[in-house]
Image (tube, grey):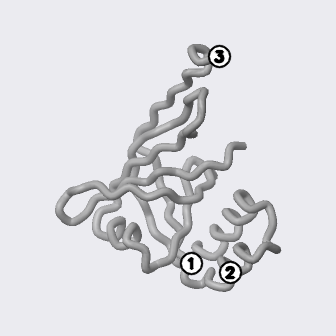
Amino acid sequence: MTEIPVRLASLSAGGAPLLCSLWFLYDEGAIWCATPRTAKVVELLQNDPRCGFEIGGDLMPYRGVRGQGSATLSRADGPAILLRLIDRYLHSRDSGFARWLIARQDAEVAIRIEPAWLTSWDFSARMKT
């Protein structure tokens, strides 16, 4: 499994997009992220749950998925999702960074993105080296 972030776009009150990169996992048809409840993306998604996303690497061969969906925020799920993300991206809860994240897990909010549509691309066949 590739360990790259999701690029999540949300809308400001003025309608301008804001893009941020977050750790994610895919579970039961939804994309899950966690972020501190004070993060700007939380405020924007509370005001307008519509979002866009892209998951794709920056190295050849280029391939990935992008789409649009609706986000739901959950303070109750935040700590558990954060732990799953630590396991996925850091592979251990023993590093200093992992312990720092865990120490503040009660401030995390889970973001659940329900995709409304998806598209994918894979240029592997064209980009063989």
| Number of numbered callouts drawn | 3
Q: Residues within 10 Å of mark 3 (few under 14, many from 20)?
A: few
Q: Residues within 10 Å of mark 1 (few under 14, many from 20)?
A: few
Res. 64 image quadrant: top right
Identify the mark at residue 128; answer none if there is no mark.
Answer: 3
Q: In terms of sequence position, does the residue under pointer 3 or pointer 1 come before the other?
A: 1
Q: Pick whichever, 76 or 103, lies toward us.
A: 103
Identify the mark at residue 100; answer none if there is no mark.
Answer: 2
Q: Residue at x 59, y 35 (%)?
A: 59
- Which residue in the structure is indicated by mark 1? 76
Measure how far apart labels 3 and 2 are at the Cα level: 41 Å
Q: x%, y% of residue 79? A: 63, 76
Secondary structure under the numbered disc 3 in the rendered image: loop
Q: Residue at x 55, y 21 (%)?
A: 123
Q: x%, y% of residue 126? A: 57, 14
Measure how far apart labels 1 and 2 are at the Cα level: 20 Å
Quadrant (top left/top right/bottom left/bottom right) for the C terminus? top right
